[in-house]
Image (cartoon, rainbow, N blue to C red):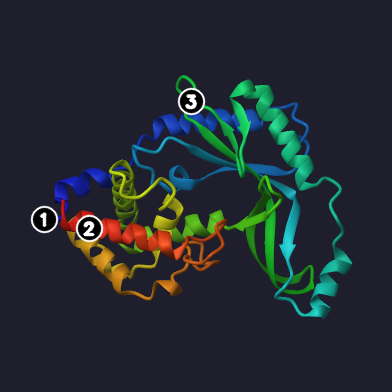
Amino acid sequence: MSIPESQLDTWSHQGSVAQSSATYATVKNALEAAGSAYAGKSYKVFLQGSYGNDTNIYAESDVDVVIQIESVFYHDLNRLPQEQQAAFKAVHSDATYTYDDFKRDVLAQLRVKFGADVKPGDKAVKIAATGGRRSTDVLITTQFRRYHRFLALDDQQFDSGICFYNASGTRIENYPRQHSDNCTTKHQITNSWFKPMVRIFKNLRSKLVDDGTIVSGDAPSYYLEGLLYNVPNEKFGGSYTDSFANCINWIWDADRSQFVCANGEYYLLRDDPNVTWSSAKCDKFLNAAVDLWKHW
């Protein structure tokens, strides 16, 4: 038998919002407090991830916070002809306050506010949960620009994202604003079915992990959002049973090599572990999901 509608309905519900909202406020206030070494710089703090996109489920605990310095940007000029690259370099100079400076100063500020609860990770700084505060990942970033044209400062075109460096020094570029905006638009044009279906897929993923069918990390939430983002709008609706069957059947038969991430900037299934999902792990998730559906 298939997964009952009642179970899918339970899985569709959004997880706790109040505690994550309070956690975000606490961390944001700490980052924006007077006296930090970067207080005089232009920067912004915002949410990303499941809580930021309203796709969080009860099993999730981490709050994802981004702090981005606005006065520094990194860039990709590879799509520009040589003369436009030269025009860019003629009007831009290297920043005197670098990403490494900003990362050092943000880490110091977090340690002042949260002490031993702060632990630098490979990509983000982790703040341990305590009391009513949820565990938090703080991603320290700068602006990133992927240029498509540069003739002058008043005649340029670029995709605006974020970038940061992991512990091994690899630069990782991503586009959280586009991801969030595109998911919101998808939710609206599917008559509010998209985000509940994302939560259903994420809860199903959690059950597969709990059952030992897949391992944690095989199907990250970010990529599940991207998977469903590619499904045609008309496949959503009617009931959760109809929507799940229509979505999974369409995904199963589609040419998944052409799927894009929800940000629209990368293919979804490729071999870059920093910004794409491996085809093997996607296939493993889909096989396990179909098997669970058939043998509930």
Image disc number at residue 291 = 2
Q: Would residue 279 be found to the left or right of residue 76 on screen?
A: left
Picture layout, residue 116 above or below residue 156: above
Mark closer to the chain start, 1 or 2: 1
Image marks 1 and 2: residues in contact by CB distance under 8 Å: no
Q: Nearer the viewer, residue 227 or 44?
A: 227
Distance from the alpha carbon under mark 1 to that under mark 2? 11 Å
* Within-10-Å neighbours for mark 3: few <14, some 14–19, many 20+: many
Mark closer to the chain start, 3 or 1: 1
* Within-10-Å neighbours for mark 2: few <14, some 14–19, many 20+: few
Residue 77 at what x, y percent from top left? Answer: 74, 70
Residue type, numbered disc 1: Met
At numbered mark 2, what does the secondary structure look like: helix, strand or loop? Answer: helix
- The residue at the point 53 percent across, 27 percent down is 128
Residue 129 appears anywhere in the view: yes
Residue 112 at what x, y percent from top left? Answer: 69, 23
Distance from the alpha carbon under mark 3 to that under mark 1? 41 Å
Q: Nearer the viewer, residue 154 or 260?
A: 260
Residue 12 at what x, y percent from top left? Answer: 27, 47
Q: Would residue 286 be found to the left or right of residue 140 on screen?
A: left
Residue type, numbered disc 2: Asp
In the rendered image, which residue does mark 3 sit on? 133
Picture layout, residue 294 above or below residue 137: below
Residue 239 appears anywhere in the view: no
Based on the displayed image, in which of its 4 quarters is residue 92 positioned?
bottom right
Residue type, numbered disc 3: Arg
In the rendered image, which residue does mark 1 sit on? 1
Distance from the alpha carbon under mark 2 to that under mark 3? 37 Å
Mark closer to the chain start, 2 or 3: 3
Q: Would residue 156 be found to the left or right of residue 267 on screen?
A: right
